[in-house]
Structure formats: C-alpha cells, structure tokens
Amino acid sequence: MTIQFLGQSAFLIETAGKKLLFDPFISENPMSKNIDVDAIEADYILLSHGHFDHVADAEAIAKRTGATIISNYEVVTWYGNKDLKGHPMNHGGKWTFDFGTVKYVNAVHSSMLPDGSYGGNSGGFVIWNEEGCFYFSGDTALTLDMKLIPMTCPKLDFAIMPIGDNFTMGYEDAAIAADFVECDKIVACHFDTFGFIEIDHAKAKKAFEDKGKTLILPEVGKTFEV
Ligand code: NI
Ligand code: MN
C-alpha cells in the first residue's frame, strides 16, 4: 500500500486501485502549506469524527471528486444534507466496499461538527483486503477496547495512531496501544501541528524501540510504502 502523509491526521492511501483519503485538514494547516488541496484525488473520504482538524477540507474535496464519505451515521447525515454522498456506519459494524472491508471501531474521544452540530461518537477504522490490513485509530485515548481488534480482524500490517498527547494519547500510551492491537509498525499522526501537541521525536521513537516496535514519524507531503 502507498501512503502519503498530508499533515495532522490526513493521509492518502492507495490500495486495490482506489484512493482513500483520511481526515483531510490541509488548507488551514500551516504545516501542509506545500500541499495543493485542489489536486488531491479521492474515491473515498474516511472521517474518524467531526472535529475541524479532521474534516476541514472534506466538503470541497468530496464536491470536486465525487468521493463517497465513510464515517459514523451523524457525520454522514450532516454531509448528506449538503448533497454529498456517503456510507454511514456505527461502532462494531463492518461493510465490504470495492476496495476491501471496513470495520468502524471504538475510540475514546468527542465529536462535534464545524457548525456545532452533534457529530456522533468518534471512531477508528480497520481496513483489510488482499494487500493487507491496517488500523486508523483516529483521535483516541488508550483504551482496552483496542484489544478487541486482534480478536475480530485480520492481523494488522501497520497502524496509524495519534501520539501528540493533550487531545489524544501521547506516545507512551500509543506504545501500549501498539501492544493491545498486536502491531509492530506504527505510523504516527496528530503531533507537532500546534503548541499543545509538539513532541520530542527522539523520546517518541525510543518509547517504541524499547518494546521492539518501529515508530514512523512521517514528513508532510512524503509518500512511502508500508
Ligand atoms: Ni478530535
Ligand atoms: Mn484532532
């Protein structure tokens, strides 16, 4: 799978010939100023919750590309009222799309849409197909519910998790989360974007190395294979 980091929690992942865009917050993220948001192609836009730093560019990109929004029922309904197409899910449910199977899993966080509308409950996604299986946790605390993922999904090849602390788990808890989901390769997100979530990169990497795990701290705009 090819992964491009677009800043904060925004990733573009290509798998099974489809482009999956996660949590687009690009045009208003100073760290993503070199990304041309009008050039991003997407077949699906997956939104973990309604917070601004995860959905800011979803409407414009969905309108331009015709991408289908996948999120919880409340978020998909909110975009549906703007005539954007979506596939609503809720916690514990899975659905098989043309690129693979998506399971919407628990997160411990809040969710409110940019205009103050109720955004349902935050979630994460586990996605699998013939190319592999990965977990995009979305904003979340460390939670014992993560132990359900290896019990109910294929073995993870990698996981994308927040490590910036304050609004989500920090890297110490994320290293424990990697144990809970039984995954050795973690791609970090939700760090350094603003003052509350600036991290010490060396300490973050060491927290994972101490457990025999790899933490990838992606650079904004860079594309890599996992
Ligand atoms: Ni959030
Ligand atoms: Mn966030």
Image: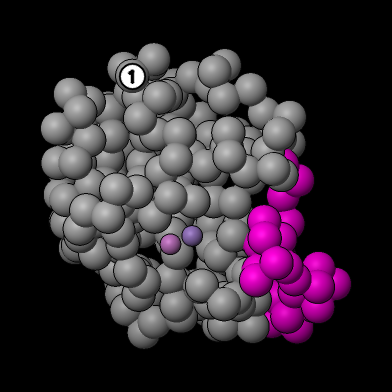
Residue at 81 percent of width and 78 percent of height: 203
Ligand 1 quadrant in view: bottom left
Using the image, determine if residue 199 lies above or below residue 105.
below
Image: 167 above or below 50: below
Respond yes or no on whether mark 1 lies under 8 Å from ligand 2.
no
Look at 59% across and 51% down and name the residue there.
8
* Image quarter of the C terminus: top right
Q: Quick check: 152 left or right of 45?
A: left
Relative image position of residue 174 (x, y in whole percent): 57, 76
Q: Along the line of sight, which residue is nearer the eye, 222 or 35?
A: 35
- Quadrant for the N terminus, please: top right
The residue shown at (69%, 43%) is 30
Question: How far from the left and from the top, in percent, is residue 60?
Answer: 40, 24
Choose top left, top right, bottom left or bottom right for residue 217: bottom right
Q: Is residue 119 visible?
A: yes
Q: Residue furthest right?
A: 202
User: What range is drawn magenta here?
Assistant: 191-220
Q: Which residue is mark 1?
A: 63
Percent position of residue 22, x then y: 45, 42
Q: Quadrant of residue 166?
A: bottom right
